Image (spheres, rainbow, N blue to C red):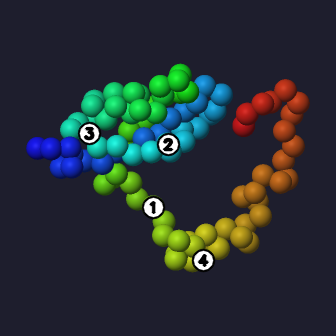
Amino acid sequence: MNDTDWPLYEVFVRSKQGLAHRHVGSLHAADDQMALENARDAYTRRNEGCSIWVVKSIYLVASQPEDRGTFFEPSEDKIYRHPTFYTIPDGIKNM
């Protein structure tokens, strides 16, 4: 088995300052552990992250751009879903 036969993984890194993982790239690996170690070596060489997720690409499901209207428009009439009516108390940095 050569590296072109290996599954494709998507790599997500959480920075030291951030709260959420961010997609940073993709890589091929023979197994999950190799994907995690290769992601560490490739995407956090300069101490950029404090957490890494690797997910086989075949397990990701995404919405399609052409479905944007029917997929997202129903939320436009539900203004209570938008946090514009709430005040955040002083001292709260992340919510």
Q: Position of residue 11 (x, y in %)?
A: 42, 41
Name which residue type carries label 4: Gly
Name which residue type carries label 3: Ala
Q: Give the labeled residue for mark 1.
A: 62
Q: Earlier in the sequence, mark 2 or mark 3?
A: 2
Q: Give the labeled residue for mark 4.
A: 69
Tell me if residue 79 comes above or below residue 37 in the rendering.
Answer: below
Q: Earlier in the sequence, mark 1 or mark 2?
A: 2
Q: Is residue 50 visible?
A: no
Q: Give the labeled residue for mark 2.
A: 24
Tell me if residue 82 comes above or below residue 70 in the rendering.
Answer: above
Give me the C-alpha separation between circle 2 and circle 3: 16 Å
User: For residue 46, which numbered disc appears in the image?
Assistant: none
Q: Give the labeled residue for mark 3.
A: 29
Name which residue type carries label 2: Val
Q: Earlier in the sequence, mark 1 or mark 4?
A: 1
Location of residue 36 (image quadrant): top left
Picture quarter with the C terminus: top right
On screen, residue 27 versus residue 6, left or right, reads: right
